[in-house]
């Protein structure tokens, strides 16, 4: 009986460890896809990914199966597994989730922001609103709101699913979340980030949430129209 218990416990530990490795592989590969490190059409070789991640092929295979369900990779019989292209629908879904998460983060931060955080937020907003601002400045502003809001789960969700500022790099025609890429926004003259920042700093929780949601919706609409080749 003791041997059976030991075997059961050992199997449970092995299963738990396997799930953790598969989850780690999933998060890492997903991040690389969304950040453009792994590009659309690129073949994903299990042995190569396993070596890079320092694990066996089994958790990598499980991670790829999960990513295929999310339409981020596609398997072609007799050819292999490849990175799929982000469609306008995929981008819309990412922006919809961003809208909810970042809107909530703005509302939470407005209720608890400190003087030091307010000063930092104003600085980041000014950089993000500058005409020469790139995606790095935009992403830094959005990431700061999530990180300072006081809800660790929201921050973890953003990091796990790579829900940073997202746009299209016109040079490579790839979706990116970081880099010296100018954000696709038609009304760059408007100080959208500063508006959001001041709503948060003033303690207007509802106004901050709506202002940030509105900015994200604007960005989504512009990006999707660009992907679909529609001129405004």
Image: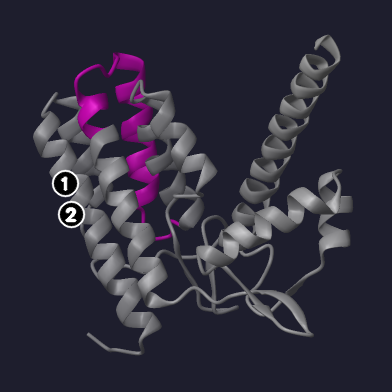
Magenta stretch: helix, strand or loop mostly? helix
Q: Which residues are magenta?
A: 106-133
Q: How is the image coloured?
A: one colour
Displayed quadrant of residue 228: bottom left
Left/right placement of residue 156 relative to residue 203 reads: right
In magenta stretch: residue 125: yes
Q: Local crowd at mark 2 within 10 Å, few (<14), some, or many (≥20)?
A: some
Proximity of marks 2 and 1: CB atoms separated by less than 8 Å: yes
CA separation in Å, label 2 and label 1: 5 Å
The residue under the point 23% across, 64% down is: 218
Find disc 2 in the rendering and name its residue.
214
Q: Residue 47: x percent and y percent?
A: 88, 60
Q: What is the secondary structure assignment of the residue under circle 2?
A: helix
Left/right placement of residue 149 relative to residue 20 reads: left
Residue 84, numbered label:
none
The residue under the point 10% across, 38% down is: 207
Find disc 1 in the rendering and name its residue.
211
In magenta stretch: residue 24: no
Left/right placement of residue 103 relative to residue 178 reads: left
The residue under the point 58% across, 75% down is: 84
Labels in figure, total: 2
């Amino acid at each position: 009986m003791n041997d059976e218990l030991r075997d059961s416990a050992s199997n449970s530990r092995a299963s738990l460890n396997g799930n953790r490795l598969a989850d780690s592989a999933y998060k890492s590969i997903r991040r690389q896809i969304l950040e453009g490190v792994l590009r659309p059409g690129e073949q994903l070789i299990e042995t190569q990914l396993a070596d890079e991640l320092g694990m066996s092929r089994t958790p990598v295979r499980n991670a790829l199966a999960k990513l295929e369900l999310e339409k981020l990779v596609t398997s072609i019989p007799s050819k292999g597994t490849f990175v799929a292209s982000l469609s306008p629908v995929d981008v819309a879904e990412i922006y919809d989730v961003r809208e909810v998460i970042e809107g909530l983060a703005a509302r939470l931060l407005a209720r608890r922001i400190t003087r030091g955080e307010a000063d930092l937020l104003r600085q980041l907003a000014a950089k993000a609103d500058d005409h020469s601002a790139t995606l790095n400045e935009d992403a830094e502003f959005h990431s700061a709101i999530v990180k300072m809001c006081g809800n660790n789960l929201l921050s973890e969700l953003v990091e796990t699913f790579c829900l940073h500022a997202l746009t299209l790099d016109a040079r490579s025609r790839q979706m990116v979340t970081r880099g010296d890429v100018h954000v696709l926004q038609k009304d760059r003259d408007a100080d959208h980030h500063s508006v959001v920042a001041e709503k948060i700093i003033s303690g207007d929780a509802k106004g901050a949430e709506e202002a940030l949601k509105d900015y994200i919706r604007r960005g989504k609409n512009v990006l999707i129209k660009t992907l679909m080749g529609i001129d405004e």
